[in-house]
Image (spheres, grey):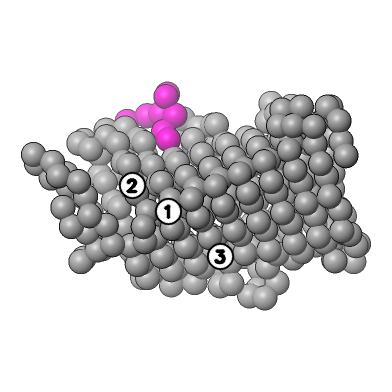
Amino acid sequence: DIGPGQWSFSCNIGQSPGNVGGDLTFRGAGVGKTVFGAGAGSGVWSGVSHANCVGTKWAFENLSIMGIYAVVWFGGGESTWTNVVFEGGNAAWYDAVDTSGSACAKGQQGTHRFFSSRFSVASSGGGFGFLNHCGDNWFWGSEILFTPAPGQSGASIISGGAGNRVHLYGSNVRAEAHANAGATGNLAAISVSDSAELHAHGVGIDVIGKAGWTLTALGAATGGEIHANESSYFIRPSTGATIQRIANSGGHVHAPYQWEPHPTPPVILSENGADIA
């Protein structure tokens, strides 16, 4: 049990495997009261770090986690997060094989479950809000918000590599251009590639950009697979931008959708046969 204050936690930050993560539960005094890490301007790398420890089973409840990368998780293990706010400068969550950001081999993924939690990246220079390169990640009733820094592009969720998966239920994924963003850019809610999977059911998917931008809700490439049935989409502006609900370059997307009526239907690029207006 952890009272109000500022803390940090890491397991084997040196990345050599072998240390035992242990079965630990961290109960905070509330979001914004118990804080792991510090805001991006502080230079703190991460509030919670896991570097290839073994036997890890962690739970975090009722607290905030901050850093340039709020949580960095290398390797396997298991975690559960309930009523946690993740605030990152470059990313709110970063799971990968190591600092290279590469995907781990299939079967080496950690399993992470998020309940009633919020991920926020207010002005990212990292190109993503949630990076999934070594995890099987499950969300219920949670929110992922990503805003790239001026001059930057990116996606709220990037998932890549065989065995890496994201599951979203009753949640919101939002990508918003920065108020000082330039006249051109690329912004996506979800990007999946290299045989990774993403499942979004009962999810609000929002992409809010600017005229002259390319705005993508679902992007799949090189064997990436997306199932996004029973989800809704909001993409703005409806004119002056290139709107792609589905951008498929060698992936696989199941996401049928019927757009509401308009006097003039908007020009929406999508997978052939996937949309009705």
Question: Which residue is the site of mark 3?
Answer: 165
Q: Residues within 10 Å of mark 3 (few under 14, many from 20)?
A: many
Q: Which residues are magenta?
A: 176-184
Instruction: Identify the residue position indicated by label 2 in the image.
Output: 233
Query: Mark 2: which secondary structure?
Result: strand
- Helix or strand or loop: what does disc 1 sit on? loop
Horizontal arrangement in the rendering, residue 216 relative to residue 7 (left or right): left
- The amino acid beneath tag 2 is Tyr
Q: Residue furthest bottom?
A: 107
If you read the primary sequence from the N terminus, does the residue marked by circle 3 or circle 2 appear first? 3
Q: Are marks 2 and 1 in contact (CB under 8 Å)?
A: no
The residues tagged by marks 3 and 2 sit, at their Cα atoms, a distance apart of: 21 Å
Q: Residue at x 83, y 38 (%)?
A: 8
Q: Nearer the viewer, mark 3 or mark 1?
A: 1
Q: Is residue 222 visible?
A: no
- Up/down of 228 relative to 66, above or below: below
Which sits in the foreground, 202 or 144?
Answer: 202
In this view, 75 is above or below 139: below
The kind of residue tagged 3 is: Arg
Residue 261 position, x and y percent, is 14, 44
Is 192 in the magenta? no
Residue 202's tag is: 1
Q: Main secondary structure of the magenta part?
A: loop
